Image (tube, grey):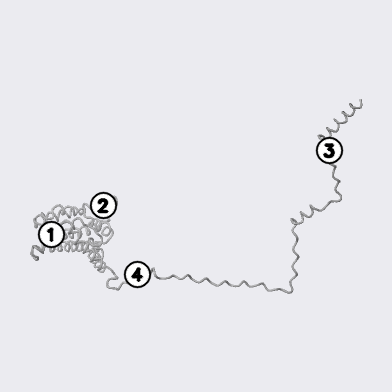
Amino acid sequence: MNECMERLKNGIITENPVFIMALGLCPAFAVTTNAVNALGMGISSLTVLMFSNLLISLISKLIPGRVRLPAEIVVVASLVTIVQLLMQGFAPSLYDALGIYIPLIVVNCIILGRAEAYALGAKPLPALFDGIGMGIGFTLALFLLGSFREIIGAGSFFGIPLVPEAYHISIFVLPPGAFLVMSFLVAAMQYYQDPNRGKKATVGPSLEEVKTVVVKPAPKPAAKPVPKPASNPGAAPAAPAKESPVAEKPAAASAPNPEAAPAAPAKESPVAEKPAAADLKEEKKGEE
């Protein structure tokens, strides 16, 4: 029983199909020009939702997975046809006012959505209460929309005049008025479900206060002194550092080598001897 009551509360408040889930907005805006039309549409949808959830839950194990959605549409369409014929016979004026929106209940996303999301895998009794809760939530949303629009726009309630004609705001009877009323009702529902409502909000510092705050750099940690290694009197003395052989190379190259052979004398250039041979020939010719 607790589960059934939870499904009722879920459909009316927690997951209201119009104010929270924003489903079924087309009929919600189109037929809510007055409270009578809103109630007629809401009760029709409630009836279809309630019985479609129950029937789909009962036959869920008999429906093959491949034809699941067509089977659900057949069930919903059969119920909508019954509601349409009953309304046409017992409330013809309401039937004429709602017009095409009665047959369009077949493709209402609320009905098919609940059939897919919940009724198909739930037991019959919780599925029935889920349909009742969603239907009541949808009817309540339509009734509030239609009532506010009729009172503000037409100055009447269920056809009873309440406000003089001079104070009528006719825009609320037109489509823009539906959006205006819807926005206020959604805001009220969100405020009601806000867990922090009524609590004082914590206000942070203003922009000017943030700009004037001087941020001081964090102090650097002091460097720790490196401990010196303790001298060990019993340790052997360190070996002297070896001289690098690279530094000895220039000295070895500059020192003379006594065992080396003496350097050969430089040969005279033959170019310098040619003038001497020419002089000797001239002297011999002069003697002859």
Is 146 in front, or is 87?
146
Cα separation between marks 1 and 4: 44 Å
What is the number of the mark on residue 4? none
Is 48 in front, or is 17?
17
Question: Which amino acid type corresponds to the residue marked 2 in the rendered image?
Answer: Leu
The number of discs equals 4
Residue under pointer 1: 170
Around disc 4, counting alpha carbons within 10 Å, would you say few (fewer than 14), some (14 to 19), or many (20 or more)?
Answer: few
Give me the residue at 81% from left, 53% from top.
255
Question: Which amino acid type corresponds to the residue marked 3 in the rendered image?
Answer: Glu
Around disc 1, counting alpha carbons within 10 Å, would you say few (fewer than 14), some (14 to 19), or many (20 or more)?
Answer: some
Residue under pointer 2: 69
Upstream in the sequence, badge 1 or badge 3?
1
Q: For the view shown, which residue lies furthest in the right direction?
A: 287
What is the number of the mark on residue 268? 3
Is 144 in front, or is 118?
144
User: Quadrant where the C terminus lies?
Assistant: top right
Q: Residue 116, position in %: x, y?
A: 27, 56
Q: Residue 187, position in %: x, y?
A: 24, 65
What is the number of the mark on residue 206? 4
Q: Quadrant of residue 79?
A: bottom left
SS assignment at label 4:
loop
Cα separation between marks 4 and 3: 103 Å
Of badges 1 and 3, the one in the foreground is 3
Question: Which amino acid type corresponds to the residue marked 1 in the rendered image?
Answer: Ser
Is 29 in front, or is 48?
29
| Label pair 2/4, CB-CB below 8 angstroms | no
| Label pair 1/3, CB-CB below 8 angstroms | no
Cα separation between marks 1 and 3: 132 Å
